[in-house]
């Protein structure tokens, strides 16, 4: 089944692993692997970087992403330090001034699961 959406190619500043959250980086159409909730979430990559550090980023549809924590399905997700997604919990991130939400996870799974996320990035600023 085709799931049309927005996928854009970027130049990466370093290696980005498959099924990880991608963040905007400095420069024209530059990207990097997200390193936490403060990373400016751009979307998710399915294949990671190629040997020329080019990366396709899913920016607005359903995409597979690696879980960095346990999900029941239906939770909002944020990037962890490895670019995986973890469930957003206001208490856990109470001290963070800026929180980048990647999207809503659509299925249950534990750490290491590759599950679907509806990529809908938005920002919470306190």
Image (tube, rainbow, N blue to C red):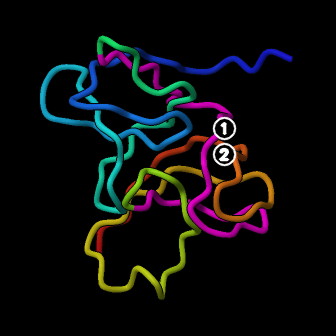
Mark 2 residue element = strand
Name the residue located 64 percent from the left edge and 54 percent from the top edge: 104
Q: Given contact means CB atoms under 8 Å apart, are the residues at marks 2 and 1 in contact?
A: yes
Instruction: Tell me the tag on residue 117.
Output: 2
Instruction: Tell me the tag on residue 64.
Output: 1
Instruction: Using residue 76 as the reference point, say whether residue 57 is left or right of it.
Output: left
The location of residue 15, given as percent across then percent down, is: 32, 31
Residue found at the very far left of the displayed protein: 27
| Residue 76 lies in the magenta stretch | yes
| Residue 65 lies in the magenta stretch | yes
Say which quarter of the image contains residue 81. bottom left
Name the residue located 49 percent from the left edge and 81 percent from the top edge: 90
| Range covered by the magenta-colored residues | 53-80
Q: Which of 94 and 71 is in front in this view?
A: 71
Label 1 environment density (alpha carbons within 10 Å; few <14, some 14–19, many ≥20): many
Q: Nearer the viewer, residue 84 or 122?
A: 84
Image quarter hosting the C terminus:
bottom left
């Amino acid at each position: 089944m085709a799931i049309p959406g927005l996928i854009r190619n970027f130049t990466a500043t370093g290696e980005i692993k498959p099924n990880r959250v991608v963040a905007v980086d400095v420069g024209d159409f530059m990207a990097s692997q997200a390193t936490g909730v403060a990373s400016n979430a751009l979307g998710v990559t399915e294949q990671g970087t190629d040997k020329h550090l080019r990366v396709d980023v899913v920016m607005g549809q359903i995409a597979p992403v690696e879980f960095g924590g346990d999900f029941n399905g239906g939770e909002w997700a944020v990037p962890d330090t490895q670019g995986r997604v973890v469930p957003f919990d206001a208490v856990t991130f109470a001290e963070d001034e800026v929180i980048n939400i990647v999207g809503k996870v659509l299925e249950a799974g534990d750490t290491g699961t590759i599950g679907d996320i509806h990529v809908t990035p938005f920002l919470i600023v306190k």
